[in-house]
Amino acid sequence: MIILQLTGGLGNQMFQYAFGRSTALRLGVGLRIDITNHTLQIHNGVELGRVFGIPVQIATTADVRSVLGWQYSRFTRGLLRRAGAGALICKSYIAEQGFGFKPEFLQVSDNVFLSGYWQSEKYFHNVADTIRSDFRFCLLPSEPNVALAAAINMPGVDSVSLHIRRGDYVHNAAVNAIHGSCSLAYYQDAMALVAGRVKNPHFYVFSDDVNWVAGNLPMPYPHTLVDHNRGSSSYEDMRLMSTCRHHVIANSSFSWWGAWLNDKAGKIVVAPKRWFSNADVVDVLPEGWIRL
């Protein structure tokens, strides 16, 4: 049995699930999800089942205790993580230390508790087709999103998703210290790069602060501001992003997945080379994506 700790919003949950699913498939065992982390409620809760119809099996207290033993206490696990005490951590508790791909995590054994973000395609590239199949949106889109998807896929138009993440990245000092936010220069350069490679670009702009975008980012190309998917329907933006032909993403797991779920041949994906404000982590971007 693999127990996966779920943390954060939809994009983070998808990275975590992808690694847990890959590990469970390799070992031929079941996957259960620990949903006790408080950050889930800051966003929209557990979204894997609601958005993708994934039959999530929730780990019980008994499940977690049976795997972790003396490490069961979240207080104990927190102390071990903060101390970076990898040598003290029992093999059943697999805690990601920092960001970046660590190949040794691909060799974890059965009966483990996985705690981390696992933000790299390298953790699941060998089962990428399975992950794409798992991440099929199961809910019917609303009428406005049906119409927008039709426009995005209109023949002769090179649709480009452009994601601008603000919210807590800008207004929460602790979050900003970790992630920072992409500059206007990044988006201007990214748009120019894509426009120089395609014939008829049309940018579909997704943001949690569309009014700020409209007032601050010059858009010298045909574009559409998408601002109607909010709250529990915000996943619809990811679905729309994935239908675009090309992508300009933020340093955000949400638009990372919007680009990755697009399986069109020849897609262009432009991503910020600085994913975190205090660290340059190259493993988060798949091969072939353009770092700008």
Image (tube, grey):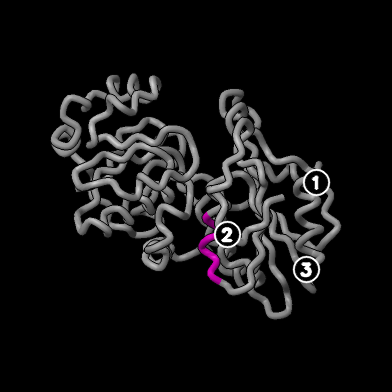
Magenta part of the chain: 257-263
Q: Earlier in the sequence, mark 2 or mark 3?
A: 3
Q: Which of the 4 quarters of the picture holds residue 117?
A: top left
User: Which percent across, then down, holds residue 212?
Assistant: 74, 40
Circles 1 and 3, Cβ within 8 Å, touching? The answer is no
Residue at the (30%, 49%) spot, across then down: 107
- Identify the residue shown where x is 37% and y is 63%: 127
Q: Which residue is mark 1?
A: 217
Secondary element at tag 2: loop
Residue at coordinates 40% horizontally, 68% vertically from top-left? 129
Report whether 111 appears left or right of 277: left
| Residue 206 in view of the camera | no
Question: Badge 2: few (under 14), some or many (20 or more) residues near its Cα, within 10 Å?
Answer: few
Identity of the residue drawn at 83% across and 61% down: 221
Q: Which residue is identified by label 2?
A: 287
Badges 1 and 2: C-beta atoms under 8 Å apart?
no
Rendered position, 239 above or below 214: below
**Residue 113 in sight from this viewpoint:** yes
Seen from the viewer's position, the closer of residues 247 and 94 is 94
What residue sits right under mark 3 in the picture?
197
- Disc 1 secondary structure class: loop
Of circles 2 and 3, which is in front? 2
User: Magenta span has 258?
Assistant: yes
Relative to 121, does residue 261 appear above or below in the rendering?
below
- Residue 81 sits inside the magenta stretch: no
- Give the residue type at disc 2: Glu
Three-letter code, disc 3: Arg
Say the numbered circle drawn on residue 173.
none
